[in-house]
């Protein structure tokens, strides 16, 4: 499929590009090559090919959901800069 200069001018108008005559011809050649390549890809028979979402097998690895004891409060507060009545103390924001 070859694109015409008029089609390139229409595309240039849609994307608001000002193209020179040489650029129009270059784009016509390049876009025509791309469209020809895509048409070649459509000729490939994919009837026996299974559709894939990913080229490698993908599976999620989940760990068992189990209850574990938490970290003791004293250990959590040990490195806090300010502690008051067993809680983190932070400066007022407002």
Image (cartoon, helix red, strand yellow):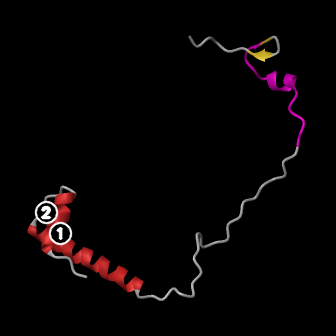
- Asked if 25 appears above or below 72 in the picture, the reply is below
Q: Residues within 10 Å of mark 1 (few under 14, many from 20)?
A: some
The residue shown at (13%, 73%) is 5
- The circle drawn on residue 19 is 2
Q: Nearer the viewer, residue 51 or 74?
A: 51
Q: Quadrant of the N terminus?
A: bottom left
* Residue farthest along the front direction in this orientation: 47
| Residue to which mark 1 is pinned | 8
Kindly indicate the quadrant of the structure image that contains residue 33: bottom left
Tag nearer the camera, 2 or 1: 1
Expressed as whole percent of the image width and height from the top left, the position of residue 64 reads 84, 52
Q: Position of residue 90 (x, y in %)?
A: 67, 15
Q: Main secondary structure of the magenta part?
A: loop
Question: Which residue lies at the image location 74% right of the left edge and 14% below the top edge?
Answer: 82
Q: Looking at the image, which is closer to me, 83 or 19?
A: 19
Q: Position of residue 79 (x, y in %)?
A: 78, 23
Q: Is residue 94 above or below residue 17?
A: above
């Amino acid at each position: 499929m070859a694109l015409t200069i008029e089609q390139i001018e229409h595309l240039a108008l849609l994307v608001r590009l000002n193209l020179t005559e040489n650029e129009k011809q270059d784009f016509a050649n390049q876009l025509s090559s791309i469209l020809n390549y895509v048409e070649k890809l459509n000729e490939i028979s994919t009837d026996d090919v299974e559709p894939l979402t990913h080229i490698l097998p993908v599976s999620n690895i989940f760990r068992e959901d189990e209850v574990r004891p938490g970290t003791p409060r004293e250990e959590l507060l040990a490195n806090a800069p300010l502690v008051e009545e067993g809680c983190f103390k932070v400066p007022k924001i407002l």
